[in-house]
Image: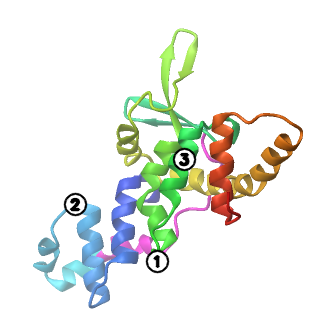
Amino acid sequence: MWDKMTVGKYQQLYDVLQVQTFENVVDRQIALLACLDEKSVDYYEAMPFLQLQRDHLPRVAFLSNEPPAPNKPPRWLRIGWREYKVLYDFRDICAGQFIDVMSITKAPEGGNPVVHTIANLHRLMSAICLPVRFAVNGRRVMPYGFVPFDTVANDMLQAPITDVLNISGFFFDAWKAFLKDIPGYLTRRMEKGKMLTEAERIVLEIALVSAGAGL
């Protein structure tokens, strides 16, 4: 089932599993079934319990396990008739993307960072993927914003969750290393008398704030 799961469906199921509260386990399982099958809770509550237990509850058992172990994260994502290039190299990310990623990944004060991240996976993907156009000489990667952010984020709701979890896991590991290393790198450049671009200044300021080092 995991190989057929989309980001949007995973977010809905995760909310039932980790965020919502229920009086008992069966209520939660029925809510999971309703979400998985896109049917009402009443449909399952009206069903004879033995039928529910025999024919339906086993279908949500896989949700008690973690998604499959990560594979190599893909470089390209095809969703519907659009294709996107996933950016892993921070040298390819513009200042606008960097700012958007910082905004998206910052959980509200007192909020659960994991819950926040899962709920915003589609928006994170929108910030680190670029749309592709096809031409006679191959793919042409378009600039950030060529397709509106919300349009891309909506596309990402239909992306395979296994791919997106692999991408986001790889990205966050690289992101942490980047935020740790980039202030020192840019500071050394300034000490050598080199001027930073406006984009580099924005990146430096945000990285310092993220690290709690001040501006």
**Residue placed under numbered mark 3 in the picture:** 99
At label 1, the amino acid type is Gly
Looking at the rendered structure, which numbered label has been put on residue 38? 2
At label 3, the amino acid type is Ile
**Dot placed on the residue nearer the N-terminal end, 3 or 2:** 2
| CA neighbours of label 3 inside 10 A, class few (<14), some (14 to 19), many (20+) | some
Q: Nearer the viewer, mark 3 or mark 2?
A: 3
- Residue at 86% across / 36% down in the picture? 193
What stretch of residues is rendered in magenta? 57-74
Q: Looking at the picture, how far across and down is residue 90, in whole percent?
A: 68, 41
Relative side of 168 to 157, left or right: right
Q: Is residue 94 visible?
A: yes
Label 2 residue SS:
loop
Label 3 residue SS:
helix
- For the residues labelled 3 and 2, the Cα–Cα distance comes to 36 Å
- For the residues labelled 2 and 1, the Cα–Cα distance comes to 32 Å
Relative side of 124 to 71, left or right: left
At label 2, the amino acid type is Glu
**Residue placed under numbered mark 1 in the picture:** 110
Location of the N terminus (image quadrant): bottom left
Q: In the rendered image of this protein, does residue 194 appear above or below residue 63? A: above
| CA neighbours of label 2 inside 10 A, class few (<14), some (14 to 19), many (20+) | few
- For the residues labelled 3 and 1, the Cα–Cα distance comes to 22 Å
Residue 64 shown in magenta: yes
Location of the C terminus (image quadrant): bottom right
**Dot placed on the residue nearer the N-terminal end, 2 or 1:** 2
Label 1 residue SS:
loop
Q: Is residue 163 visible?
A: no
**Dot placed on the residue nearer the N-terminal end, 3 or 1:** 3
